[in-house]
Image: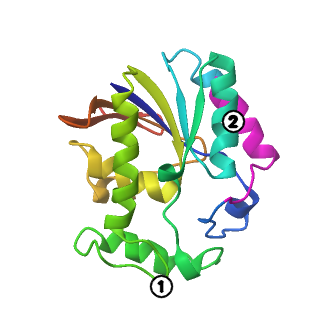
Amino acid sequence: MRLVIVRHGNTDSNINHLLDTGHPGAPLNDTGLAQAAALAQRLAGEPIEAVFTSDLTRAIQTGAPLAELLGVPLYPMTGLREIFAGEHDMSPEWDPYVEVLISWGTDPSNALPGMENARDFLGRWEPVIDDIAARGYECVAIVSHGAALRTWVPYASQNLTPAMVSRWPMHNTAVMVLEGNPTDGWRALSWDGGDLG
């Protein structure tokens, strides 16, 4: 199975460096809407059979032009949301949140006040991936969020580690491609335009 994994387009929260992790979240701004339209054209050659998005506004808006262009269904999924920052949601200070995410490699129970921990996150994310795989699609697009993707993609990929991806960019509408399945595992083929072999 092929997963074409996308980070959402640009929002005013991105521009203002706000830790926007809650529901429904900021919508795409004009730049983000243009990025979503360009993404649809960029992925038009992929054999995508369905588009699954987080149910946050910016993710749905990013996936909608792709689903429309390809004539495939779009499914908003609560389990694909961003990692919630708890009391730090909408804060301009990212460091405490990022430090917790980094710590999950050794302490998956660590969290800020009101924030979900690694077990909470994987406990909602992994069942969605299992559900998608069980539907029998050969290729799907998944639109989600920066912290969630930086956490799950190296966790799931046999050829990546969190330390590796921490140094790599993930721009708005960045695309990561994985192949595999939930039983045998996943292998990352590309990251934000870079071929992983």
> In the current view of this chain or complex, which residue is farthest to the left?
184
Q: Quadrant of the C terminus?
A: top left
Mark 1: secondary structure: loop
Left or right, 39 with respect to 51, comes to right
138 and 28: which one is in front?
138
Question: Could you tell me which secondary element the residue under label 2 belongs to?
Answer: helix
The residue depicted at 59 percent of the width and 25 percent of the height is: 73
Q: Count numbered badges in the picture.
A: 2
Residue 74 location (% of width, % of height): 60, 31
Where is mark 2, residue-wise?
36
The magenta segment:
24-40
- Can you identify the residue that label 1 sits on? 113
Horizontal relation, residue 80 to residue 27: left or right: left
Q: Is residue 32 above or below residue 137?
A: below
The residue drawn where x is 41% and y is 54% is: 150
Q: Spatial distance from mark 2 to mark 1, Cα to Cα?
A: 33 Å
Q: Quadrant of the N terminus?
A: top left
- Amino acid tagged 1: Pro
